[in-house]
Image (cartoon, rainbow, N blue to C red):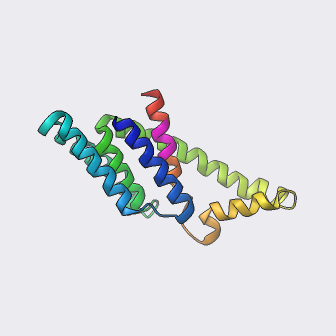
C-alpha cells in the first residue's frame, strides 16, 4: 500500500519540479504524514518509530548537499517523505539509485549542451528550445530539476526491491 503512495508522491513532485523548479511543501508534508499515520495504524508505536527513523535517514542523506547549495530544500523534504513511507533501508537504496540516476542525467544534459545542441540547434530548433525550458542552467540556476532523479531512483528501487 505505501508503495502506491510513494510512487504517486514522487511522480507529482517530479512533474511539479519540471514545471516550476520547486517541490511544494504541502506535497512533501502530506507524504510525511501519510507515512507516519500509515505505519502507526499498521504497527502501532513500533510502526511510528520505523517511519520516523526513515524520515531522519532521508534528511541525513541529503543534508550535506543542501548545505552546500547543490540541491533545493524541496528535494530534501521529498526524500524525508520517502523515508517516512518506506523506512530506513528503503530510503538508503533510493538515495543510492537517485545518485546514480542524477549523475547520468547530469552527464546527458552536459553532453547535450556542450556537444549536440550547438551542432543540431538549427535542425532541432524546437528540441533545443525545449531543452532550454527544461534546463534551469540556461536560466542562471544551479542545476536541473533533481526531483526527476529522485522519482526515477524511487521507481527503480521499487522495481528491484
Q: Is residue 74 above or below residue 79?
A: below
Q: Is residue 61 visible?
A: no
Q: Is residue 24 above or below residue 55?
A: below
The residue stretch that appears in magenta:
151-155
Based on the displayed image, in which of its 4 quarters is residue 101 positioned? top right
Q: How many marks?
A: 0
Residue drawn at 50 percent across, 35 percent down? 156
Q: Is residue 148 above or below residue 3?
A: below
Q: Is residue 30 visible?
A: yes
Q: Position of residue 9 (x, y in %)?
A: 42, 48
Q: Position of residue 133 (x, y in %)?
A: 66, 64
Q: Is residue 139 magenta?
A: no
Residue drawn at 48 percent across, 43 percent down? 98
Based on the displayed image, in which of its 4 quarters is residue 29 positioned? bottom left
Q: Residue furthest left?
A: 45
> Is residue 75 left or right of 49 when viewed as pictured?
right
Residue drawn at 52 percent across, 64 percent down? 21
Q: Quadrant of the C terminus?
A: top left
Amino acid at each position: 500500500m505505501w508503495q502506491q503512495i510513494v510512487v504517486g508522491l514522487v511522480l507529482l513532485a517530479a512533474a511539479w519540479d519540471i514545471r516550476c523548479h520547486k517541490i511544494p511543501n504541502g506535497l512533501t508534508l502530506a507524504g510525511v504524514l501519510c507515512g507516519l499515520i500509515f505505519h502507526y495504524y499498521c504497527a502501532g508505536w513500533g510502526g511510528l518509530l520505523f517511519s520516523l527513523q526513515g524520515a531522519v535517514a532521508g534528511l541525513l542523506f541529503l543534508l550535506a548537499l543542501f548545505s552546500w547549495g547543490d540541491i533545493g530544500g524541496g528535494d530534501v523534504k521529498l526524500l524525508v517523505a520517502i523515508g517516512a513511507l518506506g523506512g530506513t533501508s528503503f530510503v538508503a537504496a533510493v538515495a543510492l539509485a537517485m545518485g546514480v540516476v542524477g549523475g547520468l542525467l547530469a552527464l546527458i544534459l552536459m553532453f547535450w549542451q556542450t556537444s549536440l545542441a550547438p551542432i543540431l540547434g538549427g535542425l532541432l530548433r524546437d528540441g533545443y528550445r525545449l531543452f532550454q525550458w527544461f534546463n534551469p542552467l540556461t536560466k542562471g540556476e544551479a542545476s536541473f530539476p533533481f526531483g526527476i532523479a529522485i522519482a526515477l531512483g524511487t521507481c527503480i528501487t521499487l522495481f528491484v526491491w
